[in-house]
Amino acid sequence: MTPLERRYRWLMRAYPRSYRSAYGEELLDVLLGHTDPACSTPPFKEAAGLLVNGARERVWQAVTAPKWADGVHLGVTALCVANLATLLPYVASIPAWCALSALTLTLVILGRVRHALPLALLTGAKAWALGTGVAFIDATQLPVEPGFLTHDPLYARSGPVAAVTGPLLVCAGLVLLAVREERPRRRSWWWLPAVPLLAAADPAWMSLEDPGPVVLVRVAAETVTLTAAAWAGRTTGDPRWALAAAIYLVARSAALSENLPFQSRQNLAYWGLLAFLTLVAALVPHGSRTRALD
């Protein structure tokens, strides 16, 4: 295998596995036939086209699942990632609760919502107990000191509303999914790397006046994800991504609103950006073109 073919095969991973199995070799032959064999790297135009078209094919395949259930499942997955990211810096102090939160996320990714629901209720009750200072199951109470990534104790810059809203939305979403006969489709394991990307940047009080690297990473991750949701909705004319974005924005808004009088202009402007992107994701599916699905 030549370096050029190997790099083309790597870029073709942007396409879903089923698409690669059906058309991968044919597509590879076309690409190799139109590229100078002396080249060891695909031309930029070809590489960009593979990545964009692969992403487009993935979102088109996603619309085969029931839209409202899939949108709720996607939103619940994003919230489970955010909830685990909040606990991650405190894993040395509350290892059992971090493990339960990680297991909840894993089950949600696998689509096993009925197994995830009792764990989400348990961790949600613990989040409420920590946020309100009530002992629940074990003696762990605030302050919970971090082990890495941050110097602030858990929920130091937020209160019970921010602590409970995310887990409450997760539980509500899981209840809606659990009563359905059809199990949600399995989601990508690429959700897991998002956990450390969001960790240590408290959404209730992110300093955007002089942001550090962890804050900038969270800002970039949220902005790119919501922009992608708008693009997917525009591409397919489907509202599931807008629903997921709205679920995430509700939790994000609760975290910000609890300290609203003390938020900086930069923080309010950034929340406005997230709200704008969510609104765009909700509006762009209307009037978009659709394509026939096999």
Image: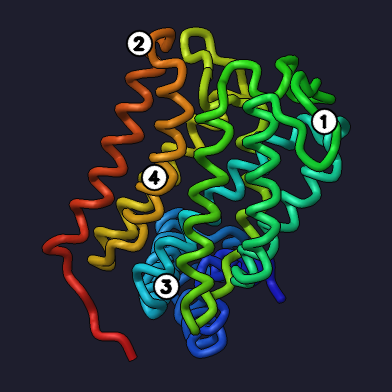
Residue designated by label 4? 226
Q: Secondary structure at mark 4?
A: helix
Q: Please determine whether, in this image, residue 249 is positioned above or below residue 239.
A: above
Residue designated by label 2? 265
- In primary-sequence order, the first of circles 4 and 3 is 3
Expressed as whole percent of the image width and height from the top left, the position of residue 285 reads 21, 60
Classify residue 236 as left or right of residue 138.
left
Check whether the beta carbons of the residues at disc 1 and disc 3 lie within 8 A of each other. Answer: no
Q: Which residue is nearer to you in this view: 186 or 251?
A: 251
What is the spatial separation of the Cα atoms under label 4 and label 3, in whole angstroms? Answer: 17 Å
Classify residue 241 as left or right of residue 37.
left
Q: Please determine whether, in this image, residue 113 is positioned above or below residue 25.
A: above
Residue designated by label 3? 62
Q: Residues within 10 Å of mark 4 (few under 14, many from 20)?
A: many
- In primary-sequence order, the first of circles 1 and 3 is 3
Q: Residues within 10 Å of mark 3 (few under 14, many from 20)?
A: some
Expressed as whole percent of the image width and height from the top left, the position of residue 22 reads 51, 90
